[in-house]
């Protein structure tokens, strides 16, 4: 488990950039993204497979990441890969002490570490979330690749708190095939919302 080798003050960063959040509840708002390396969930449709091997990415000190963020904003998304493969307690401590708001995007497959302003839980069938994260999630985002994912979405929605925002997001390559089914589902289940990867439509990072 990668947390055993965590350097605490350094984390493997695949990429970092300032852009528009393209998915979920904060879609359309500017955020600084930090994508950590390392993931063994192994979604076959993943569009950032180059993030899976953390050995391919440079370990960067947390204070250097903070300096980079401050040039642009005080709103940050920590994503991956699967960021919770690393102990993020020190990262959230240092970022919060610099008045930086932290959002986490995770499959929930590993223990939750750190204190977060917003948690987007995107569960995967291959490695289900740890039970304790469901009550912490502010947003549930289920990727729709096939018809069975609607069943999975309903099952997962029954585990989160009542205030959690619910989103269905078509997997990019299956958009045309699944979009009408997603629309129909949301019209019949009005507590759900549609999330689109608008950054891809806008042709931005």
Image: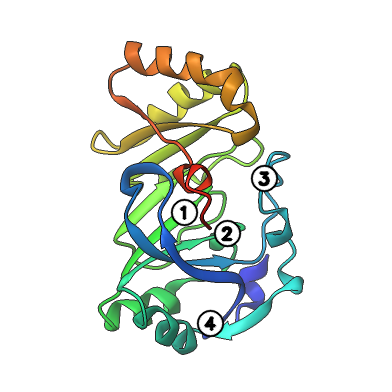
The residue sitting at 41% across, 87% down in the picture is 67
SS label for mark 1: strand
Label 4 crowd (10 A; few <14 / some 14-19 / many >=20) = some
Residue at which label 4 appears: 8
Q: Which residue is drawn at 34% across and 11% down?
A: 188
Q: Is residue 52 left or right of residue 162?
A: right
CA distance for labels 2 and 4: 17 Å
- Residue 163 left/right relative to 198: left
**C-alpha span from label 2 to label 1:** 8 Å
Q: Is mark 3 on a helix, strand or loop?
A: loop
Whether tag 1 and tag 3 are in contact, CB under 8 A, the answer is no
Viewer-nearest of labels 2 and 4? 2
Rate crowding at label 1 as few (under 14), some (14 to 19) or many (20 or more) other CA atoms within 10 Å: many
Q: In this view, does 189 lie above or below 77?
A: above
Label 1, on which residue? 105
Q: Which label's residue is closer to the chain start, 2 or 4? A: 4
Disc 2: which residue: 80
Q: Tell whether label 1 touches label 2 (CB within 8 Å).
A: yes
Say which label, 1 or 3, has the lower sequence index: 3
Position above or below: 30 against 141: below
Task: Give left or right: position of 122 versus 174.
Answer: left
Compute the Cα span from label 4 to label 3.
27 Å
Instruction: Name above or below for residue 99 compared with residue 50.
Output: below
Q: Which of marks 1 and 3 is in front?
A: 3
Mark sitting earlier along the chain (4/1): 4
Q: Name the residue under label 3.
A: 46
Along the line of sight, which residue is nearer the eye, 153 or 23? 23
Query: In this rendering, which labeled residue sits more in front, label 4 or label 1?
Result: 1
Residue at coordinates 43% horizontally, 79% vertically from top-left? Answer: 90
The percent coordinates of residue 42 (x first, y second) are 71, 46
Q: Distance between the residues labelled 4 and 1?
A: 19 Å
User: Could you give the CA–CA distance between mark 3 and mark 2, rounded to whole angstroms?
Assistant: 11 Å
């Amino acid at each position: 488990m990668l947390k055993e080798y965590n350097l605490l003050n350094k984390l493997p960063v695949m990429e970092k950039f300032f852009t528009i959040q393209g998915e979920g509840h904060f879609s359309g708002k500017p955020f600084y993204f930090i994508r950590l390396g390392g993931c063994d969930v192994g979604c076959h449709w993943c569009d950032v497979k180059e993030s899976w091997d953390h050995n391919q990415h440079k370990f960067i000190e947390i204070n250097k990441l903070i300096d980079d963020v401050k040039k642009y904003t005080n709103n940050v998304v920590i994503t991956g890969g699967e960021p919770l493969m690393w102990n993020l307690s020190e990262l959230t401590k240092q970022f919060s002490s610099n008045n930086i708001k932290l959002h986490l995007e995770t499959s929930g497959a590993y223990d939750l570490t750190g204190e977060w302003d917003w948690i987007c839980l995107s569960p995967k069938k291959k490695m289900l979330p740890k039970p304790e994260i469901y009550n912490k999630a502010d947003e549930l985002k289920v990727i729709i690749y096939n018809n069975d994912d609607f069943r999975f979405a309903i099952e997962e929605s029954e585990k989160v708190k009542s205030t959690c925002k619910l989103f269905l997001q078509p997997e990019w390559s299956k958009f045309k095939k699944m979009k009408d089914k997603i629309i129909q589902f949301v019209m019949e289940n009005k507590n759900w919302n549609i999330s689109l990867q608008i950054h891809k439509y806008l042709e931005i990072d």
